[in-house]
Image (tube, grey):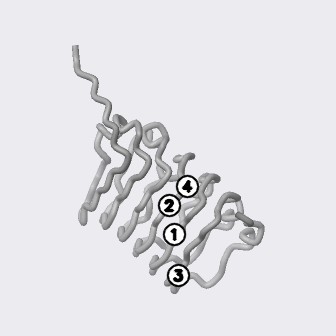
Amino acid sequence: GGTVVSLRVGALDVDARATLGDLPDWLDQLENLKALSLERLQTCPQLACAEEKLRKVVTIRFTGCTSSPPTWMGSLTALRTLDLSGCKGLGELPEGMLSLTGLRTLNLSFCDGLRKLPEGMGKLKGLRTLILSWCKLLKELPEGMGGLTG
């Protein structure tokens, strides 16, 4: 028989400063993972079945990356804090992020290329903190944001 390993890691920090194609297969063994930090990546990692493998993650830091955030982030229903600060390649927030209805904090500071936020931002009813400092190209906010009371 094989050996079953249960890793009880609460946080994983990846500072690649390069290309990370896929997140490792063993990631789904990190059953208690609550925080994932992916910093300074040139391309975003792909992850099959992210909603299953990262179902308990409540905090993601995807900071200083040159690409847009991966689409799988929109499937993480437990996510409460998303830090995309310093992502130079982020021109607009992907529509998939609007499904993160439990999101409390969204940090988009220093996203130099950010030009617009999705029209459906008002769907993020739990959003309490939205940080947009130094987003120089962002000229207006979507209309539906006035209904956010957090």
Real-space CA distance between mark 3 and mark 2, rounded to the nearest whole angstrom: 15 Å
Q: Residues within 10 Å of mark 2 (few under 14, many from 20)?
A: many
- The circle on residue 134 is none
Mark 4 and mark 3 in contact (Cβ < 8 Å)?
Answer: no
Q: Earlier in the sequence, mark 1 or mark 3?
A: 1
Q: Which residue matches tag 4?
A: 80
- Which residue is at a point 31% across and 36% down the rendered structure image? 7
Q: Amino acid at mark 1?
A: Asn
- Which residue is at a point 47% across and 55% down the rendered structure image? 59
- The circle on residue 107 is 1
Q: Earlier in the sequence, mark 4 or mark 1?
A: 4
Q: Amino acid at mark 2?
A: Leu
Q: Which residue matches tag 3?
A: 133
- Describe residue 107's horizontal placement relative to residue 68 as left or right: right
Residue 22 position in % (x across, y down): 31, 48
- Describe residue 60's horizontal placement relative to residue 41 as left or right: right
Residue 39 vs residue 4, the one in the foreground:
4
Q: Which residue matches tag 2?
A: 82
Residue 102 position in % (x across, y down): 62, 52
Real-space CA distance between mark 2 and mark 1, rounded to the nearest whole angstrom: 6 Å
31 lies above or below 12: above
